[in-house]
Image (cartoon, grey):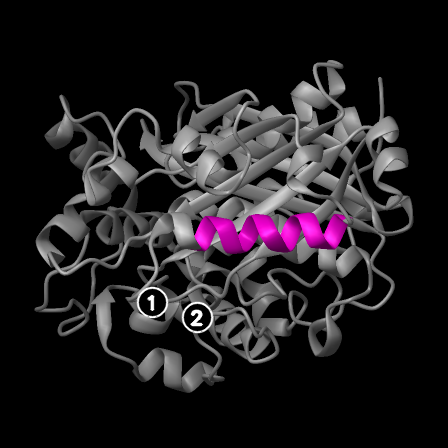
């Protein structure tokens, strides 16, 4: 198969951008990616634009991708709008990789942008309500919350302030893991504390203040065992990646800093019992990605995984087979996922700290891994990083994510 590379990446700071539109943020990310690759707009032959909330929050349905491309000076090329919940950005990247691999183009741009902070807070939170089958909401809720049965929340461990139903679902995932493997709230808090410590060194992160493990545990509760620092915030931001063939790299003259895409996989879930781990969407996607890349989990030096809550990192580290099933909690508590540890995970700070502008999230993770594999991450650099793993999930169907993307990269 033809080799595919990331020649350039660009990313805005994630956070609240009061005076910028999604298109302003997208332009900033595009400009950064083109500059990083030594490219100009005329070099781009196809655009894949990820946006999950453009319709519900901005009222721009149907063609946000073509609008974003034209505003960025990318008119006249094929443009596709991609919506796949929190995995939208990674799905756009996957499609760009497939286009280059198929020979449809030599240089494709994957871009994700979201403007999620709006004045109408009710509408802002309602944007998350369609991340599952809206014709079976009560069934969805009952099925997912049942996963946490058997672990009762202690008194006073649930917020009296409104929060998304998906926080209850994430808490159910936590409690199910606690019941099955003995995972503790302290271990989940260790993930959050580690990620907040990592984000101190990331100038593009939404939150850059270290939080100790004890501070995480003592923070305001969301719903047991989750506290506020364990959960991602609502974010604005954009990120982009320029994907190239070898011919495209030669044209740009940027081969020296390119990162090779070893494999790119996107899967949807299947019906299975919660105890059947091998049928889990993340495990199946990871297994396929490793097989296609010709590497194994033991070869991975650094990973960025989806952690809308700290529990996500535990579940996804196990799905990527970076630790044995049920062992991610203890590994996190021992510091194995920290910078300087056995397998650093989310050196960017993760979604909890870096931020989570849905359509841009996956590409923001890829931005971090490209930076790591180039050795350009500064104080958060993973020493000697050569192989990187990326996992990004979105939506909910059945007992797990609706879609999961797994990508593997190597230093060129």
- The spot of residue 72 in percent (x, y) is 51, 43
Q: Viewed as shown, does residue 175 lie left or right of 381? A: left
Q: Viewed as shown, does residue 268 lie left or right of 303? A: left
How many numbered markers are drawn? 2
Q: Is the Cβ of the residue at disc 2 closer than 8 Å to that at disc 1?
A: yes
**Quarter occupied by the N terminus:** top right
Q: Is residue 306 above or below residue 337?
A: above
- The spot of residue 302 in percent (x, y) is 72, 56
Foreground of the two, 208 or 110: 110
Q: Bounds of the magenta span?
A: 25-37
Residue carrying label 2 = 206
Q: Is residue 265 above or below residue 383?
A: above
Q: Is residue 401 visible?
A: no
Foreground of the two, 18 or 222: 18
Quarter assignment of residue 402: top left
Q: Is residue 122 above or below residue 278?
A: below
Pointer 1 local density, CA inside 10 Å: few below 14, some 14–19, many at least 20 = some
Foreground of the two, 386 or 340: 386
Pointer 2 local density, CA inside 10 Å: few below 14, some 14–19, many at least 20 = many
Foreground of the two, 386 or 217: 386
SS state under label 1? loop
Residue at 31 percent across and 27 percent down: it is: 398
SS state under label 2? loop
Residue carrying label 1 = 16
Q: Is residue 148 above or below residue 400?
A: below
Residue at 72 percent across and 48 percent down: it is: 8
Which circle's residue, 2 or 1, is located before the other in the chain? 1
**Quarter occupied by the C terminus:** top right
Q: Viewed as shown, does residue 408 lie left or right of 284? A: right
Closer to us: mark 2 or mark 1? 1
């Amino acid at each position: 198969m033809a080799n595919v590379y990331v020649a350039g990446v660009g990313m805005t700071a994630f956070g609240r951008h009061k005076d910028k539109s999604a298109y302003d943020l997208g332009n900033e990310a595009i400009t950064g990616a083109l500059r990083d690759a030594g490219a100009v707009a005329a070099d781009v032959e196809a655009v894949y634009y990820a946006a999950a909330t453009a319709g519900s929050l901005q009222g721009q349905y149907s063609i946000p991708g073509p609008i974003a491309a034209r505003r960025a000076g990318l008119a006249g090329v094929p443009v596709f709008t991609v919506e796949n919940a929190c995995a939208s950005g990674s799905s756009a990247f996957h499609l760009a990789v497939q286009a280059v691999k198929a020979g449809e183009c030599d240089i494709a741009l994957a871009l994700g942008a979201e403007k999620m902070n709006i004045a109408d807070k009710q509408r802002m939170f309602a944007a998350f309500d369609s991340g599952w089958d809206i014709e079976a909401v009560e069934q969805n809720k009952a099925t997912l919350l049942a996963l946490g049965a058997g672990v009762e929340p202690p008194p006073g461990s649930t917020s009296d302030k409104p929060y998304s139903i998906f926080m209850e679902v994430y808490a159910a995932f936590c409690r199910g893991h606690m019941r099955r493997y003995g995972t503790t709230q302290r271990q989940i808090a260790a993930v959050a504390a580690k990620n907040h410590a990592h984000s101190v060194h990331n100038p593009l992160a939404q939150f850059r203040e270290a939080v100790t493990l004890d501070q995480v545990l003592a923070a305001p509760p969301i719903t047991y065992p989750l506290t506020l620092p364990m959960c991602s915030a609502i974010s604005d931001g954009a990120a982009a990646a320029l994907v190239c063939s070898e011919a495209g790299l030669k044209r740009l003259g940027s081969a020296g800093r390119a990162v090779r895409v070893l494999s790119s996989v996107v899967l949807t879930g299947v019906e299975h019992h919660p105890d059947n781990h091998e049928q889990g969407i993340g495990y199946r996607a990871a297994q396929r990605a490793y097989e296609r890349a010709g590497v194994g989990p033991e070869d991975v030096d650094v990973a960025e995984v989806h952690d809308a809550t700290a529990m996500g990192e535990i579940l996804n580290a196990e799905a990527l087979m970076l630790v044995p099933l049920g062992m991610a909690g203890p590994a996190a508590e021992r510091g194995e996922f920290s910078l300087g540890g056995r397998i650093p995970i989310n050196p960017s700070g993760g979604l909890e700290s870096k931020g989570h502008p849905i359509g841009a999230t996956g590409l923001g993770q890829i931005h971090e891994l490209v930076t790591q594999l180039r050795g350009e991450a500064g104080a958060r650099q993973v020493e000697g990083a050569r192989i990187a793993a990326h996992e990004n999930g979105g939506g909910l169907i059945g007992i797990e994510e609706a879609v999961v993307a797994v990508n593997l990269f190597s230093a060129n």
